Amino acid sequence: MSMVDEPLYPIAVLIDELKNDDIQLRLNSIRRLSTIARALGEDRTRKELIPFLSENNDDDDEVLLAMAEELGVFIPYVGGVEHAHVLLPPLETLCTVEETCVRDKAVESLCRIGSQMRESDLVEHFIPLVKRLAAGEWFTARVSACGLFHIVYPSAPEVSKTELRNIYNQLCQDDMPMVRRSAASNLGKFAATVEYTHLKADIISIFEDLTQDDQDSVRLLAVEGCAALGKLLEPHDCVAHVLPVIVNFSQDKSWRVRYMVANQLYELCEAVGPDPTKTELVPAYVHLLRDNEAEVRIAAAGKVTKFCRILSAELAIQHILPCVKELSSDTSQHVRSALASVIMGMAPVLGKDATIEQLLPIFLSLLKDEFPDVRLNIISKLDQVNQVIGIDLLSQSLLPAIVELAEDRHWRVRLAIIEYIPLLASQLGVGFFDDKLGSLCMQWLQDKVYSIRDAAANNLKRLAEEFGPEWAMQHIIPQTLDMINNPHYLYRMTILRAISLLAPVLGSEITCSSLLPVVVHASKDRVPNIKFNVAKVLQSLIPIVDQSTVEKTIRPCLVELSEDPDVDVRFFANQALQAIDQVMMTS
């Protein structure tokens, strides 16, 4: 190939590969567009590469998706912002394809390019593009157009602004539900760019039309528009235009729309303000909490604490609490689970007396629920109640339930209880803990499930940190070390794990006098798994104990293990001996 033809080579390769039958080759060439553009230079990229891409009608969605993504970051390769408009034609073509994810990516790339373009170029090139898409014969073009209005509207001259608002209005009344859906979902973004007078005059009427659409898929997207519009409008306009829509939606014939209202309720309350929430939205929320559909009740139950925070304690007790009582015995376990995950947060809102009288019985009934997730959700939030009602009452009411759950047949429930024990211990205090929960902590070290035994060993470490080495020596260490003689090797391994975790907390003196002899004794075990775990534990003890102990006790033990018949035991023993040598060298 001659030197004259050399610059043509990349584009020739690209064209060849883009027409190749192998999809992977086509994909690779599209993903290398930036490299090819750099090789061609800005001028030839604009004049040759971009027109070629505009004409390229690949039928594979994966290739088109990659092209839509690449073009979004292509401004530097076509000569900067002043030439950004040359990227619009290929993306306009991609906005009309049938595959949704390709169209979405093309719209995203157009928005990225449009946000960087100069105002004059937006008016000259981008606004006509939006109009063409909005007038497209095929619905896909019109769907894509809806996502571009918020980019062009702020830069448009006054005449074009009026035209753009009218076009958007037409899209909201399109025959195709997909177009109306797209218009509904993008209304909030478009409304944020429209002047306040037109917002009230035009956008509100568009919004009201969408809220009365016969397709529930359009109406449920209009629910999101309620929150977006509510934040843009003055409070009195919001109450006049948005609030009635929310109330109607909460009783919509489609459960999907009601579900969206329940899901978005807190945002909707923020939009309309506290007073209308108390008078208008409380009845609507009660309606949702008692909905026929379990999905709606799940969404509503999950917002109960957030909603109560907006209200006074009296209103919450009067209106919301009766519904909460009903939901705590709901037929759907998922509703009860959603309630259990947030109900604890109601305690600070209602105050001590109402929590003791009204909420505590609900907590207890949920703690005894047959469904493990419900119980777990209650356990994980107990500290929020403790702050309100105090530890004495909490321990009297909840402790029997916690003890029962500590022996639950579902291991995940037992695991959740273990993870909560250190927090509970710090709240209950050392005396109470020793009486009620100490024996449980030892019991878990011999659980049938490994995750429980491992969590139990970690739990002992956290308790030693909480109550101090002296307490640990008195209450944890004797019972723990006794278990090293358990006939089952897996339980003996758990004790070695516990020793390695406790040693850094208890310090050098206790480790040398109480823990190390047990580890050395375990090195004589008949099971290789125990012996190589001994080597690992001894390695972890090297930084904790003094140098003389390492030489007198740890090294001889490791030397013996390094001559063991088992290959794994020898490996870990030698690894630990190397660690000793490194410590010696550095010291």
Image: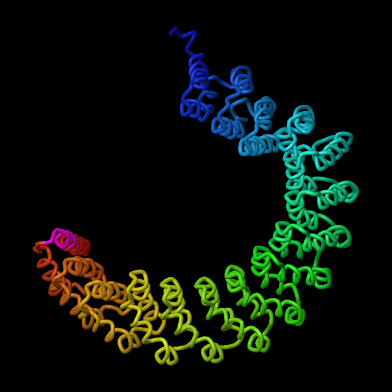
* Side of 11 relative to 352 (left or right): left
Q: Is residue 134 above or below residue 485?
A: above
Query: Magenta segment: does it hold 362?
Result: no
Quarter placement of the C terminus: bottom left
Q: Position of residue 160 (x, y in %)?
A: 86, 34
Q: Which residue is pictured at 22% across the width and 61% down the height?
A: 586
**Which of 230 and 529 lies nearest the eye of the viewer?**
529
* Magenta stretch secondary structure, dominant: helix
Q: Position of residue 322 (x, y in %)?
A: 71, 80
The magenta segment is 566-572
Q: How is the image coloured?
A: rainbow
Query: Magenta segment: does it hold 571?
Result: yes
Q: Is residue 474 above or below residue 99?
A: below
Q: Position of residue 396 (x, y in %)?
A: 52, 91
Q: Which residue is pictured at 32% across the width and 84% down the height?
A: 476
Examine the image and state in which quarter residue 355 appears: bottom right
* Side of 55 relative to 372 (left or right): right
**Which of 19 and 309 lies nearest the eye of the viewer?**
19
